[in-house]
């Protein structure tokens, strides 16, 4: 699947369907495009309604964070990380303004 990369700004979250699988894409503030399945593995909140914090996508439900490399975790008020498991990601290639997405 291909889409225009220029339409996804840093901090933006976009739901997307790839071969019948629901994902979200987001661009971190570092400019890198990342992905995770659309529905949160905790209690199924819609991650398309999440927000980007630096490079992470944060769930609107209970603030689990996703790093786009397949890791889910929660940060406590002291900044420590509580791992919450792994999630699928898409293979993402950006080339000359076009994004190519594949299931991994
Ligand atoms: S539903 Fe996402 S953190 Fe709880």
Image (cartoon, rainbow, N blue to C red):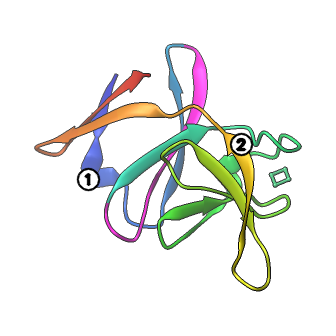
Q: Residues within 10 Å of mark 1 (few under 14, many from 20)?
A: few
Which residue reaches farthest top? 19
Which residue reaches farthest bottom? 78
In magenta, the rendered stretch is 20-31
Q: Secondary structure at mark 1?
A: helix
Mark 1, residue position? 6
Q: Where's residue 81, x and y in %?
A: 70, 67
Mark 2, residue position? 85
Going by the image, does 65 lie left or right of 32? right
Residue at horizontal 45%, vertical 31%? Answer: 90
Closest to the observer, 65 or 81: 81
Q: Where's residue 33, x and y in %?
A: 37, 51
Going by the image, does 41 lie left or right of 48? right
Q: Where's residue 63, x and y in %?
A: 77, 64
Residue 41: name its quadrant. top right
Q: Is residue 86 above or below residue 100?
A: below
Q: Where's residue 93, x and y in %?
A: 25, 36
Q: Is residue 61 above or below residue 37?
A: below
> What is the distance, in whole Å, between disc 1 and disc 2 at their CAs?
31 Å
Q: Secondary structure at mark 2?
A: strand
Residue at horizontal 55%, vertical 41%? Answer: 70
Residue at horizontal 42%, vertical 63%? Answer: 28
Q: Is residue 85 magenta?
A: no
Q: Is residue 27 magenta?
A: yes
Q: Residues within 10 Å of mark 2 (few under 14, many from 20)?
A: few
Q: Say the numbered circle drawn on residue 58.
A: none
């Amino acid at each position: 699947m291909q889409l225009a990369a220029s339409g996804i700004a840093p901090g933006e979250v976009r739901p997307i369907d790839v071969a019948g699988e629901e994902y979200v894409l987001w661009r971190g503030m570092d400019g890198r495009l990342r992905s995770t399945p659309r529905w949160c593995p905790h209690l199924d909140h819609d991650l398309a309604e999440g927000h980007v914090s630096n490079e992470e996508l944060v769930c609107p439900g209970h603030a689990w964070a996703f790093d786009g490399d397949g890791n889910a975790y929660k940060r406590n008020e002291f900044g420590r990380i509580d791992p919450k498991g792994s999630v699928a990601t898409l293979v993402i290639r950006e080339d000359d303004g076009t994004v190519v997405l594949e299931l991994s």
